[in-house]
Image (spheres, rainbow, N blue to C red):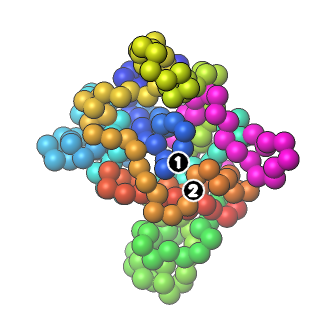
Amino acid sequence: MTSTMEKKNALVFTPKGFHQAITLQYPEENRSLIVCKKCKKNYKSRYICRKKNRHTGLPWTDTYICVFIHESCLVRMEGERKLSFIRDKVIAGQVVEKKGFDMNMPNASTDLPICSSCKHNNYTRSYCRQQKQHRHLPWNTEYAVMYATDEPYFDESSVGDHGKSKDQYSSAYPSVDAEARGEEDTGIGEREGNINDVHDSRAFLLTISCIASSLKWLDP
């Protein structure tokens, strides 16, 4: 597994309550990943931030990602109806083309950007989200798949303080170097939604930035 230090055009974040950080890899040619807070402050371009300096910190402003959870991430425990995330492998993410995704929000949300159709017709947010009650995803949504890799996940808390170094398990850890992230922290706290409460759709809309984030489960 390639370490985060070696990745270009990638985002690292830790959903609230999740047991590990997730590295979301954008395609090399994709230019939609917004710069981190540090590079925004210093007027750095996306190329400098995400590719040359390989920062993986949270974007400085809201970014919208529709995430589908692949079955490789999930397991149904004996005697339980709901699916749960596996905990012994690294969970990663890959930004993909929109093709095949047809998801909607459970209700209209006035705090989101307009949908693609309304953007194309130059309509306002109030027309889209209030008057028409459109439940479509924001026009600038990226689409991604979460999947489990073959790399075993090492939980540092499981061994306690026995002198073991993270360097011994570097392939299973996203980078913890602040300079590599371009941020002080990769952790985020959702205003709503719980990633561990996996819905039948296995898809959610993640609104993420260095300030706050929200997670909304989606309907097919």
Q: Which residue is drawn at 52% across and 41% down?
A: 95
Residues in magenta, as a range: 75-100
Q: Residue at x 45, y 63 (%)?
A: 191
Residue 46 position in % (x across, y down):
28, 40
Residue 50 position in % (x across, y down):
31, 35
Q: Name the residue under label 1.
A: 17
**Type of the residue with mark 2:** Asn
Give me the C-alpha separation between circle 1 and circle 2.
8 Å
Q: Nearer the viewer, residue 170 or 162?
A: 162
Q: Is 52 rendered above or below residue 122?
A: above
Q: How crowded is mark 1: few (under 14 residues within 10 Å), some or many (20 or more)?
A: few
Quadrant of the snapshot with the C terminus: bottom right
Q: Mark 2 points at which residue?
A: 194
Q: Nearer the viewer, residue 17 or 48?
A: 17
Q: Name the disc covering residue 208, or none.
A: none
In this rendering, the label closer to the viewer, 1 or 2: 1
**Type of the residue with mark 1:** Gly
Q: Are marks 1 and 2 in contact (CB under 8 Å)?
A: yes
- Is residue 90 a member of the stretch shown in magenta? yes
Q: Residue at x 49, y 68 (%)?
A: 115
Q: Can residue 98 be seen in this view?
A: no
Label 2 element class: loop
Residue 59 position in % (x across, y down):
33, 48
Q: Nearer the viewer, residue 117 or 134?
A: 134
